[in-house]
Amino acid sequence: MRYILALDQGTTSSRAVLVGEDGVPVAIAQEEFPQHYPRPGWVEHDPEDIWRSQLACARGCLERARISPSQVVAIGVANQRETTLIWDRATGRPLHNAIVWQCRRSAPICEELKASGLAEVVRSRTGLVLDPYFSATKLMWLLRNVPQLREKALHGEALFGTVDTYLIWRLSGGRLHITDPSNASRTMLFNLTSLRWDDELLEAFGIPREMLPEVRPSSSVYGEADPALLGARVPIASAIGDQQAALFGQGCFAPGQAKNTYGTGCFLLLNVGQEPIFPANGLLGTVAWDLGRGATYALEGSVFVAGAAIQWLRDELGIIASARESEELAATVADTGGVYFVPAFVGLGAPYWDPHARGVIAGLTRGTSRAHIVRAALEAICYQTRDVLEAMVREGAQKAALLRADGGAAQNNLLLQLQADILGLPIERPRYTEVTALGAAFLAGLAVGLWPGLDAVASLRAVDRIFEPRLDRRSRDARYEKWCRAVRLAMNWASPDEA
Ligand code: ADP
């Protein structure tokens, strides 16, 4: 048996998954690492923690599976996106902590750029919203605040990378400084049409090109891992952002195929094919992957509060003891009794994009019970997903015929049944839920010829369960209309200085 070692470097933990040539994950290792919050709204990681935890997981995984490193035919990398690192080319030493995607420190820089009219330029070239979320303004912040960084960068002595780039740099013993188009497309420096770093944006942002990695396909043998690390010269053969990895791991290879990850928030990605879409209304246009024959693109929409609403019911209201209990309790009532819950705790994301929105529970009566409220929270996850899918169709994307579900909350059967009912679409849950690692593994396996092509990879996928819609169209749309009314109640609530 031959294996792929997939690294899944996430925001709060690193994971490694060993995937057999039959597509079955045989061993998993996971390690959490510290989060740093130097000021309110700022989030950092120590790059050494990222690397140490990731390497420990990779080794742990091989030990657990009791296989020889020579049976590992490739390493694939999936990673938290947008997080920004800088390091010294000669010593490999980080020049600052990693600035994590959640970090808002570059908000004032974004305001400056908006004032100089760059928001539309950014949208029309990168597919993104001009926001601190993406790497570019984090890197600008570093260039302004780390002494001598600009000089070093101009002399090729300081390197920039997202987490994929940093891990591959470390894995290769400092020989490879590369990224892939899916990660590059989250930096706000990458031109979605030419699939190159955008020189005009680099100039407008004052970022030296010398510090950027080379962009290589998402599935390709980039080089070999230093044998001192894992005990063999294993080829490093894929790099892909975690959400795009999940899209690939869910087998969404064709236009119109979509996956939704039900976690703290939701990340919905829809494959839109070989032409990029540059959306308005808070959706993002992004590269899904590049297999070496040009890019496949995706539309992405995120919901800020999904599973987090269930946590809120558990931790703040105390009306459930565990997230899992939400299923049992919500199933004790036939419907929400007319209750709608808009969990706009931090404003609303796509397609409303209203930072001043706040949460609302509407339609309460004397008969409302905690079961109704819990059910309304589950439905809210589903309605928000419908909001995003409808916005995607308005952008001209092909409508999905089925939605593939993953993430922690996708274990909730009632949630997925409600989702099928509210969308009028079947929802499919895969047998192996480690879809992010599977995506990186599939891409790496394709690069080294472990599988001959996408059809072979598609045949490795196994389905756990499909939830068929049971609600007729009229009831579905009537409820959705009520949801839209509840959203209007939530919008524009906080005063400008509160957001
Ligand atoms: P993340 O990767 O975003 O941290 P996970 O994919 O681990 O999240 O999912 C955790 C989230 O899913 C939590 O917000 C939790 O409330 C929610 N969740 C977990 N299990 C269930 C369940 N059975 N029903 C509903 N929500 C759940």
Image (cartoon, helix red, strand yellow):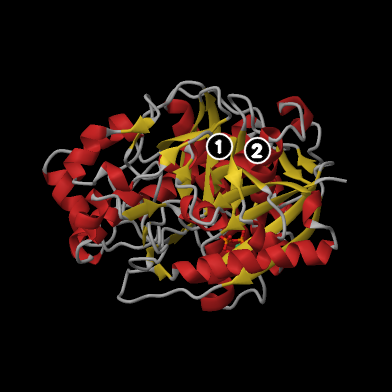
Q: Residue at x 37, y 57 (%)?
A: 89
The part of the image, by quadrant, that contains residue 419 is top right
| Residue type beneath disc 1 | Ser
Above or below: residue 185 compared with residue 410: above
Asked whether residue 326 appears in the rendered view, the answer is no
Q: Earlier in the sequence, mark 2 or mark 1?
A: 1
Label 2: element kind: helix
Across and down, in percent, residue 382 comes to: 58, 47
Residue at numbered disc 1: 218
Q: Nearer the viewer, residue 14 or 307?
A: 14
Asked whether residue 142 appears in the rendered view, the answer is yes
| Residue type beneath disc 2 | Leu
Q: Nearer the viewer, residue 52 or 370?
A: 52
Crowd tier of the residue under label 2, counting other residues whose Cα lies within 10 Å: few below 14, some 14–19, many 20 or above: many
Residue extending farthest to the right is: 1
Q: Are marks 2 and 1 in contact (CB under 8 Å)?
A: yes
Q: Residue at x 31, y 74 (%)?
A: 40
Across and down, in percent, residue 359 comes to: 41, 61
Residue extending farthest to the left is: 116
Q: Nearer the viewer, residue 309 or 18?
A: 18
Q: Residue at x 24, y 40 (%)?
A: 202
User: Could you tell me which quadrant the C terminus lies in?
Assistant: bottom left
How many numbered discs? Answer: 2
Q: CA distance from mark 2 to mark 1?
A: 7 Å
Q: Residue at x 85, y 63 (%)?
A: 66
Q: Nearer the viewer, residue 405 or 149?
A: 149
In the figure, is residue 444 to the left or right of 90?
A: right
Above or below: residue 433 compared with residue 280: below
Residue at numbered disc 2: 443
Q: Quadrant of ligand 1?
A: bottom right
